[in-house]
Amino acid sequence: MKHTVIALVEDRPGVLNRCASLFRRRGFNIDSLAVGTTEEPGISRMTIVVEDEGAPGIVEQVEKQLYKLIDVIDVANLTSAEAVMRELALVKVRCTSAQRREVLDLIDIFRGHVVDVSPAHLTAEIVAAEDRMTAFIENLRPYGILELVRTGRIAMMRGPQTNVVHELEPDSVLRFHTESGRRPEGELPYVSD
Amino acid sequence: MRMSGADIVLESLKRLGIDTIFGYPGGVVLPLYDRFPAHPEVRHILVRHEQGGGHAADGYARAKGALGCALATSGPGATNLVTAITNAMMDSVPTLFITGNVARNLLGKDGFQEADITGITMPVVKHNYLVMRAEDIAYTFAEAAYIATTNRPGPVHIDIPKDVFTEEAEFIWPESVSIRGYDAFPPLDEAMLRQAASYIDGAERPIIIAGHGVILSSAWDELKTFAEKTGIPVLNTLLGLGSISTDHALAYGMLGMHGSYEANHAASNADVIIGIGNRMDDRALGRFADFNPTAKIVHIDIDPAEHGKNIETHAAIVGDAKQALAALTSMVRQNTHAEWLRWIDDLRAEHSFSMAVPSGPELSVQHVLKRISEVNDDSVVIVTGVGQHQMWAAQHLKFTHPHQLITSGGLGTMGFEVPAALGAQVARPDATVWSICGDGGFQMTLQELATMVDENLPVKMAIMNNGYLGMVRQWQELFYADNYVSVAMSQPDFVKLAEAYGILGIRVESKDQVDDAIRTANAHPGPVILDFRVEAEGNVWPMVPAGAALKETVEAPERPQEVAR
């Protein structure tokens, strides 16, 4: 089963590497990964599609391990019921002038647009959820797909709910010495010190 | 106040209370070394290899319960730290690793001694930084130390290009840090605690598995109170040893691959298992699917990713072990489990022969360890390497207080014993530090003997010299039909080696020499090497073969005539 995981991350060098390295090391199977800026400067948003191959607990581990990265601010798992999910594709398809009408009809049915055209080809763009995207591509395949590019899924919760960052209160640098239970240096309870 | 990046680094260390750093100089960190004399509050200990410096910082941190710090130059210096960093990561040790790198304009150009060290350490650190401006140094150090020591502790690595050390900036020390992706002190979930308490109150055969987290969060008193109130027996993981005294009536020793028969069967037959600050590791739990499929698992760990990672958790408590145990203790009822304890005690009486000290005339590792434990008082600090001697140490030594056993658990790093003992001795100059060494591991990092001499660190290094990589040999004997391959090794004359370093060397070849040797070593004011010529082919029992379940614990093949445990 596929899961859509959202990660809000600090927009810093290496953050994508940290996440990708984590997926590689833990053997998580990633279908797609889309990264971009958000409403807030300094924060990027990743949409990660995880295939769990039927193994229980995988997506939970993905969320928890991602959250452990210091540069990852928040992680959420969006199910299709509560979220809008889309991806964008550009498809360059072989298309003679004789075929053009029927290809245009197809693109119209799927609410795509033609963005480039030549006597022998046509490039369409489509924004759709995965099922409709797959159907669109399969319908174009008989004409001969010359090139195909997809952005990977992006997603957002429906309704007024949001995935945004909540600021934490600043914390004392030396709090670990006083509050975490760790005793100040040199004051461990040794039996015969 | 304006100062150079190098001065900002040293000022920051002082503000963090870091007064000791294990380091090795090189080209790109020379601007930093140039400023050490101006900051005498920071003691620099010159090691002989960066890996040694890294393990020393690790041993220092574990012995002191404070942040350990190591420093290396770029390229090979930095890559030599990687094993030590990974070791600290696997065992959640609060450590700070500082490396220099080539100047900013040379980064990414494959210059002399350049390594992409932040890229290399990324999967083995809690967090890392490449600091590109001197003005960012102070904040980075504050944040790094905060991350290294809070929540689940771990190594943090800071890489600094050479010209950032020489760049000038205003020194502004942040009194607080704010990291929006990091909650150092997650609040306890009351409902989950109540769920756990109801499992615990309803349990007939409960056990506690206390791990390193109990020690890391200073929760040993809370553990004792909790166990005593509920009457639940306590098992330890390897790194949890010392969280409850071996002497305590409810302490039942270590479970796992070389855990006791009764501990492994108690864990397999329990109806409620309370893991505290442990990561439900395969060496402790055996084959996960058959560990104990019917038990309710209560798991207290500050790292939520440990819940449900290896085995299903029924009450997952995210939080500091100290706070969680205190809260849980107030919710559970006073209880005893006399019948259950008797069942475990009976198992112990019946099956303790696997862990008996061999009674024959040969010098056994078990005998040497027993004597080290008994000749020393309870304040001795024990550092071990990895292998048979480590497992025998866990089985036979007495651990009465936390931070007493310093050993490489998760990564299993041979060679840890010498530099980590060095670091432990620096951290606790008045303590007697015994390093239990394998003859293989000792030869991996013995270069640090010179550091001990320079710094006059009176570590007692007891080499369990059997001429083999003992644990590998045991596996080849048991699982590869006695096919010994690359496992016997020649040794230098360790007594002459000691002499070459100008330290005391003692050879021990028979049982009657053991006590004298230990006393002589303890009385000697400097480092000592003890070459114990132990029997060549002893095996550690009991044993859970790799991939087997705990209930499939294999006992010693022959029941010795005399049981002296």
Image (tube, rainbow, N blue to C red):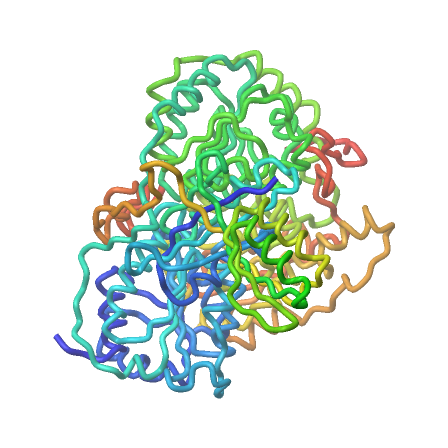
Position in image of residue B446 (x %, y %): 56, 69
Is B246 situated left or right of B343 in this image?
left
Q: Nearer the viewer, residue B207 or A151?
A: A151
Is B172 situated left or right of B466 in this image?
left
* Quadrant assignment, res A55: top right
Residue extending furthest toward the left: B1
User: Is residue B300 visible to us here?
Assistant: yes
Q: Residue at x 38, y 47 (%)?
A: A74
Position in image of residue B469 (x %, y %): 71, 58
Position in image of residue B4 (x %, y %): 22, 80
Q: Nearer the viewer, residue B119 or A186?
A: B119
Q: Residue at x 24, y 67 (%)?
A: B138
Counting labels gives 0
The correct choice, above or below, for A56 with respect to B423 in the image is: above
Q: Residue at x 30, y 47 (%)?
A: A165
Q: Residue at x 53, y 46 (%)?
A: A129
Q: Nearer the viewer, residue B393 or B202?
A: B202
User: Is residue B520 visible to us here?
Assistant: no
Is B565 situated left or right of A78 in this image?
right
Q: Nearer the viewer, residue B539 or A78?
A: A78
Is A18 situated left or right of B446 in this image?
left
The correct choice, above or below, for B401 with respect to B100 in the image is: above
* Quadrant assignment, res B304: top left
**Rendered-image quadrant of the N terminus of chain A:** top right
